[in-house]
Amino acid sequence: MKFCSLSSGSSGNSQYIEYRDTKVLVDAGHSGKKIEELLKSAGSDIKQIDAIFLTHEHIDHVKGVGVLSRRHGIKVFTTLETCKAMTSITKEIDPNNLYLFENNKPFYFKDLYIDPMDSFHDCIKGTCYSIVGNAKISIVTDTGWVNSEMMDKMQGSSLYYIEANHDKDMLLQGSYPWATKQRILSNRGHLSNENTGEILNKLLKRKNERVMLSHLSKDNNDPKLAVRTVRDSLQRGNIKEGIDYIMEVAPRDNISNIYEL
């Protein structure tokens, strides 16, 4: 099973997963051309993509979905609520390529087992995913809270792609309006570095899992700070980087390391 983050942040998000004869994206938050370029950098081709699975309707997650689906006949999987909410951005998608699912009702797509879960974000109906082939990948971004049901679905992952959006002190001391700060800090906003450390303390089993911190705020976080905060939190739980797990930050504008799981 192969995984690569194509980009991560408010300027655009997309992840690539490959297993056997199945190649999919989770989100396509750049122009179609940009997604094609990022995929090429990861050693793949947009013409080989079978489907795009969507998390929610915000433009940094769906910008290129419509044009890619229309241009290459790619299937699009999403909830009904997100489908309706994203139309102003994606425009019309061929009904023959549109597949609707309900969160918390797992299903198979080709070689992959897809387990969509509710997220908690300021969108119509957010989705996070656990995706299983010969390994398990959990993709958890754009959520202000991770509840027990989500934790159960994420257990046993080989790779956790999880947001560490902001440092609380940087956010509170920064220039954002108070209302925006409140939204980000709420349980319908984004996970902080501290939140992510607490979650990973409960999930990691010291089996050399991969952790990719994602969706870092450009204004309210720093990659080194995010890594240090999460690492320190895990160290307090006697979980040691380089021995029990491997961690990196998903780059904002280009691809991450490519993981073979």
Image: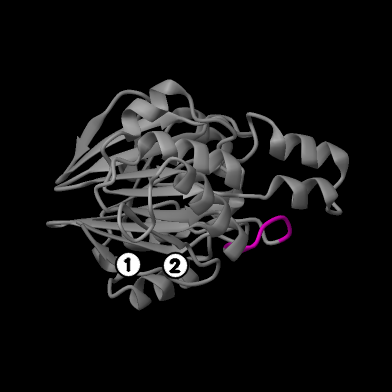
Q: Is residue 26 visible?
A: yes
User: Where residue 261 appears, x then y in whole percent?
Assistant: 20, 57
For badge 2, the amino acid type reads Ile
- How would you rate the neighbour count of disc 2 (Cα within 10 Å): few for under 14, some for 14-19, many for 20 or more? many
Residue at 50 percent of width and 31 percent of height: 119
Q: Which residue is mark 1?
A: 46
Q: Work out whether mark 1 precedes mark 2 in sequence or the reverse, and give the earlier one.
A: 2
Residue at 71 percent of width and 45 percent of height: 168
Q: Which residues are magenta?
A: 219-223
- Asked which colour scheme the image uses, the reply is one colour
Residue at 47 percent of width and 62 percent of height: 250
User: Where residue 226 appears, x then y in whole percent?
Assistant: 58, 56
Q: Nearer the viewer, residue 88 or 116?
A: 116
User: Where residue 78 appears, x then y in whole percent?
Assistant: 41, 37
Q: Which residue is mark 2?
A: 35
209 displayed left or right of 66: left
- How would you rate the neighbour count of disc 1 (Cα within 10 Å): few for under 14, some for 14-19, many for 20 or more? many
201 displayed left or right of 2: right
Q: Is residue 235 above or below residue 145?
A: below
In magenta segment, residue 237 = no
User: Where residue 111 appears, x then y in whole percent?
Assistant: 14, 46
The answer to whether marks 1 and 2 mark residues whose Cβ atoms lie closer than 8 Å is yes
In magenta segment, residue 220 = yes
Q: Nearer the viewer, residue 29 or 233?
A: 233
Q: Is residue 218 above or below residue 170?
A: below
Give the CA separation, mark 1 to mark 2.
8 Å
